[in-house]
Amino acid sequence: MNAKILKLDVGGRPIAWITREAGALHYCRDQVAWEAGIDFVRLRGGIARRTGRRSVLQVSTIIATHGVNRQVDLLNDVPALTNRRLFRRDDHTCLYCGEQFWDFDLTRDHVIPVSRGGADAWDNVVTACRACNRRKADRSLDECEAIGIRLLAVPFVPNRAEGLILANREILADQMDFLRSFAGALSDPYENDD
Ligand SMILES: [Zn+2]
């Protein structure tokens, strides 16, 4: 298991994914304020010279840590836009024909085309299959309507918790439950994963 640890601030807001080793360091430095995971990952430590025993550290899958977080207004932090995250936001579904595809058959479509001043931003991009993207070309939505292409859902900007969901492919069940309590529009991106 290579699962990461979900780090929260002391107020319970999700901050970041950290490695298990970084999680262990928070324990060693006595920075863990509380634990919210129902699972633990076990880390094997060094061998104690006196007893010859190997130490084992249990790290909760979700930990809240003390300390000041310089990032203000965390839940309004917008995750960086990448194709991988975009396709997962849209559940690998082309938002024009409604079919699901593998990543390599998907593209980033700009609802308002860049050539017409549309931004390369979460609220102006949708997942589109290659065929639909070609057909849509640089048409506006009104022009699309005229040739029978309709946008099936309005693109949304993921919040920080949703960004964390989109950024990690190995989220444990308790971590997912926790993050989803902060997530708004995002459906479960794992539902169709095998
Ligand atoms: Zn399509």
Image (spheres, rainbow, N blue to C red):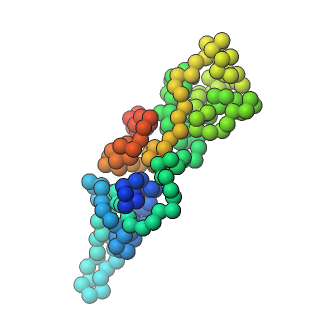
Is 29 drawn above or below residue 84 in the view shown?
below
The x and y percentages for residue 10 are 37, 61
Q: Residue furthest left?
A: 51
The x and y percentages for residue 8 are 39, 57
Count up the numbered dots: 0
Q: Residue furthest right?
A: 115
Q: Residue furthest bottom?
A: 50
Q: Quadrant of residue 43?
A: bottom left
The answer to whether one can see residue 193 in this image is no
The residue under the point 61% across, 33% down is: 124
Q: Residue furthest front?
A: 73
The x and y percentages for residue 38 are 26, 54
Is 34 drawn above or below residue 190 in the view shown?
below
Is 80 drawn above or below residue 1 in the view shown?
above
Query: Closest to the observer: 93 or 10?
Result: 10
Q: Quadrant of residue 147?
A: top right
Query: Closest to the observer: 80 or 98?
Result: 80
Residue 88 in the figure: left or right of residue 32: right
Q: Which quarter shows the N terminus?
A: bottom left
The residue under the point 64% across, 21% down is: 141
The residue under the point 44% across, 47% down is: 161
Query: Closest to the observer: 161 or 149?
Result: 161
The x and y percentages for residue 4 are 40, 56
The answer to whether one can see residue 165 in this image is yes
Residue 149 in the figure: left or right of residue 40: right
Q: Which quarter shows the C terminus?
A: top left
The residue under the point 66% across, 38% down is: 120
